[in-house]
Amino acid sequence: MTQHFLQGRTEDEVSWFRRRSFLQAAAAWTALGGFGTAVAQQRSNIVDLRGDAFVNGQKLRPDQFVQTGDQVETGPDSHLVFVMGNSAFMVRQNSRFTVERGDTLFAVSVLRLLTGAIVSVWKKGNYRVVSTPTLTAGIRGTGVYTEVAPDGRSYFCNCYGTVELSSGGEQTLSQSDYHQSFWAEVAPRNGRLITPAGAINHTDEELEMVAALVNQPTRWQELGRKGVKDGAGYMDPGRAHPLAR
């Protein structure tokens, strides 16, 4: 597994993709035709569920369908992997979020994360939003990692793609080939609400596995190489984070 740095997370949380149960489920998901076929055959859009999760207050079963408009929560020592339209999500333990409807029943317009953490991959399409209590991120096609920290700050990594970030009227444009990371502060830090961060709590392999569920390569897979995972967002070492200049 590629080098990664943990802050308030466990190794088990970032190595979920190694489990045989997930590998088998992901292979079956792809072989059966992905999301479109699941809808046509009225099958579940849940790829993998470990532990307990709840939808609209009711315990989620692996054969159920997560829909736009649902309020979802995962319990301790659990995770949930599901696909919605052309987007895929891996939800860590103790997370609470909603998926809001877009142009169609199966299109997500807003992923609203209230607590916890989610790896998400979005194929190219209409403008969509990842929202936390301190951050709004506008995306089109990208892979990102989002976490709401215990102190209320939001951590956001634009793992690849272009993302428009805003917090309390402050805005910045993130263009990343390899993990460009930010904190969205509760109160200004050194006069800023959006500050540079290192790459923490997620791995390349997680992004690759989630992206494969919607048939999307990551940027580093397209380029055939990786950069330095320092949170700056570039393939070539020595370039400073855009907010550190």
Image: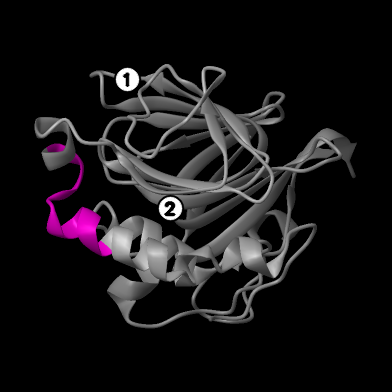
Kindly identify which numbered label has been placed on residue 47: none
Kindly identify which numbered label has been placed on residue 143: 2
Amino acid type at image mark 1:
Gly
Relative to 169, residue 84 above or below: below
Based on the displayed image, in which of its 4 quarters is residue 135 positioned? top right
**Dominant secondary structure of the magenta stretch?**
helix
Q: Secondary structure at mark 2?
A: strand
Crowding at mark 1 (Cα within 10 Å: few <14, some 14-19, many 20+): some
Q: Is residue 117 visible?
A: yes
Based on the displayed image, in which of its 4 quarters is residue 54 positioned? top right
Crowding at mark 2 (Cα within 10 Å: few <14, some 14-19, many 20+): many
Q: What's drawn in magenta, residue-wise?
A: 27-36
The picture places residue 179, in percent across and down from the top left corner, at 55, 63
Q: Secondary structure at mark 1?
A: loop
The residue wearing badge 1 is 102
Relative to 236, residue 20 above or below: above
Q: Nearer the viewer, residue 47 or 87?
A: 47
Q: Nearer the viewer, residue 182 or 143?
A: 143
The picture places residue 169, in percent across and down from the top left corner, at 68, 24
Q: Nearer the viewer, residue 135 or 21?
A: 21
Based on the displayed image, in which of its 4 quarters is residue 223 positioned? bottom left
Relative to 96, residue 26 above or below: below
